[in-house]
Structures are given as C-alpha cells and as structure tokens.
C-alpha cells in the first residue's frame, strides 16, 4: 500500500453545471442605492399626487403654486406620515420584486450565497431574535449616549411621530417595524452579505456590510456621527443572527423589535403632546 493512500475517497470535482453564481458586489450596492433613491424621488411624486387629490394643487396652477400647495398639504396633520408610509411601501415592493426575480434560486437557500428566505430549522431561534432585538438598542443606546457627551440624539422618524395623529402613528410604527426591517435585511444581510462572502472571509464581510449599513442610515440620523457605533453594533449582531440560524427571518424579527423599542418611547411621549 502506498504511503499516500487514504481511507477516504477522493472527492469528485465540483459540478459547475449546478453552480449558482452569488450576487455581484456592484449589483448589491446598486440595489441599496436604488432603494434609498426610490424613497427620495417617489416621496416628491407621491406628495404631488396627494396634493392634487386633496385639492391643494391645481394642475394648471404653475410651478410656484404647486410647490406652495404641497407645502400647505404637508402641514396638515398626518400627511407627512402618510407620504413616508406610501414611499417606503413603494420602494419595498420594487426592490423585493427585483431581488426575487434576479436570484430566484438563491431566495430560499439557507447559507450564503443564499438569501435565507426560509424559516429556521429551530423555532427557538425566534426567541433568540427577540432577545437580541431587546438587548441591541439598550447596549447601543448606552454607547451612543457616552459618545454624544450630552448632545441630543434625534432621528427623522422621531420628529415625524410627534406631529402625527394617534391612529396614523400606530400605522407608522407597524410600517417602521415590519416593512423597513424586511427590505433592509434582504439587502444588507441577504444580497450584500452574499456578495461580500464571495470575495472575503466572513469576518471582513460582516464588518464591511455593517459599516455600509451604518453609513446609509446617517442621513435619517441627521448626520450625527456618534450614532455610527450603535448602528454598526446592531448590524453586526443581525449578521451573526443571520449566519447562526441559517435564515433571514430571525434577523428581520430582531431588527423589527429594535425599531419598535427605538420609537416606542418617542411615540408614547407624543401621545400627550
């Protein structure tokens, strides 16, 4: 017997005919940019259509009256929140449909390059997701407070909730804790993480995707740099949850719980406003 023999058979060459190519990095970044760009562009169009439908704008009134009419409409209670919810819903539908159509074979694959859109093997992972969603904003909030050094930490949704009637405020909470987390998890812990693991090790992939997640949220945090570590911590924990459970749904749940805790105090305080 040769000294180089082994009791294990030599594995066959991989069958490239069944290989599913993971998302490319440019495609992943492009989808993220498209998601936020859709929100920026469609919000103006939706506001215009709402202003026309509610009679604040006349189509033949000229450019300046149109702008004034939209501003007047947005001063009405609940109108800004309605625009935000419709805008987020439209962007979510477009982006999720594009992802589903472009990578159908990866949609329900558990591990990267799969996108993880299947239930986890162990339902107990949902309990872990809730625990993560509760712990992340508490730890992140302490970290942000230390870095802020007494400065006020605000977010766009906070100001939006204060000027929204209670009924619409509840609807806004539902959208912020469901639609937003679903799309962002598909983009960052699904498509982007899969694209990064094609090039780098898991540690680097998680770090890069977490940094991009944090930076993309800075505009909604009014560019408060001291919110970056909190956002990166949240993104890293969500990526760990995605990889640990083999499913994206626990990350979606944890993200939603995180958002719920983040806005609950603001909206509860606004009830008496």
Image: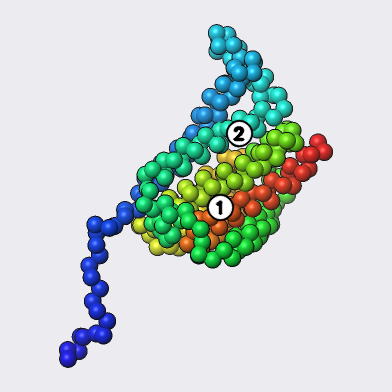
Location of residue 78 with respect to 151 vertically, above or below: above
Label 1 secondary element: helix
Q: Are marks 2 and 1 in contact (CB under 8 Å)?
A: no
Q: Position of residue 77 (x, y in %)?
A: 72, 27
* Identity of the residue furthest to the left in this view: 2
Q: Position of residue 22 (x, y in %)?
A: 35, 53
Quadrant location of residue 152? top right
Viewer-nearest residue: 233 or 246: 246
Viewer-nearest residue: 172 or 28: 172
Q: Position of residue 36 (x, y in %)?
A: 50, 38
Instruction: Evaluate whether residue 68 shows in this view.
Output: no
Quadrant location of residue 174? top right
Colour style of the rendered protein structure: rainbow
Q: Which residue is mark 1?
A: 252
Residue at 67% x, 38% y: name it.
171
Label 2 secondary element: helix
Q: Earlier in the sequence, mark 2 or mark 1?
A: 2
Q: In the picture, which quadrant includes the C terminus?
A: top right
Crowd around label 2: few <14 · some 14–19 · many ≥20 (10 Å): many
Instruction: Evaluate whether residue 199 shows in this view.
Output: yes
Q: CA distance from mark 2 to mark 1?
A: 20 Å
Location of residue 120 with respect to 49 vertically, above or below: below
The numbered disc on residue 148 is none
* Identity of the residue furthest to the bottom in this view: 1
Residue at 51% x, 61% y: name it.
120
* Identity of the residue furthest to the right in this view: 272
- Residue 183 shown left or right of residue 135 in the figure: left
Q: Which residue is mark 2?
A: 84
Q: In the picture, which quadrant includes the N terminus?
A: bottom left
- Residue 101 shown left or right of residue 229 in the figure: left
Q: Position of residue 200 (x, y in %)?
A: 38, 59
């Amino acid at each position: 017997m040769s000294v180089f023999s082994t009791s294990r058979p030599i594995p066959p060459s991989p069958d490239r005919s069944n290989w599913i190519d993971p998302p490319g990095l440019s495609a992943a970044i492009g989808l993220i940019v498209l998601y936020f760009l859709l929100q920026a562009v469609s919000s103006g169009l939706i506001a215009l259509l709402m202003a026309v439908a509610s009679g604040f704008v006349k189509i033949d009134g000229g450019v300046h009256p149109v702008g004034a009419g939209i501003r007047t409409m947005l001063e009405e209670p609940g109108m800004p929140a309605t625009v935000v919810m419709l805008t987020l819903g439209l962007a979510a539908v477009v982006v999720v449909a594009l992802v589903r159509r472009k990578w159908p074979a990866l949609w329900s694959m558990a591990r990267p390059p799969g996108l993880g859109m299947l239930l986890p093997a162990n339902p107990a992972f949902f309990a872990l997701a809730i625990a993560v969603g509760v712990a992340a904003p508490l730890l992140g909030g302490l970290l942000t407070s230390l870095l802020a050094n007494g400065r006020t930490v605000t977010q766009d949704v906070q100001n939006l909730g204060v000027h929204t009637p209670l009924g619409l405020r509840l609807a806004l909470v539902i959208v912020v804790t469901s639609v937003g987390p679903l799309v962002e998890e598909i983009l960052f812990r699904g498509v982007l993480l899969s694209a990064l693991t094609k090039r780098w090790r898991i540690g680097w992939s998680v770090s890069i995707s977490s940094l991009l997640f944090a930076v993309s949220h800075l505009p909604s945090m009014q560019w408060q740099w001291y919110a970056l570590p909190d956002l990166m911590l949240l993104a890293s924990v969500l990526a760990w949850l995605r990889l640990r459970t083999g499913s994206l749904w626990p990350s979606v749940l944890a993200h939603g719980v995180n958002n719920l805790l983040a806005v609950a105090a603001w909206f509860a305080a606004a009830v008496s406003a």
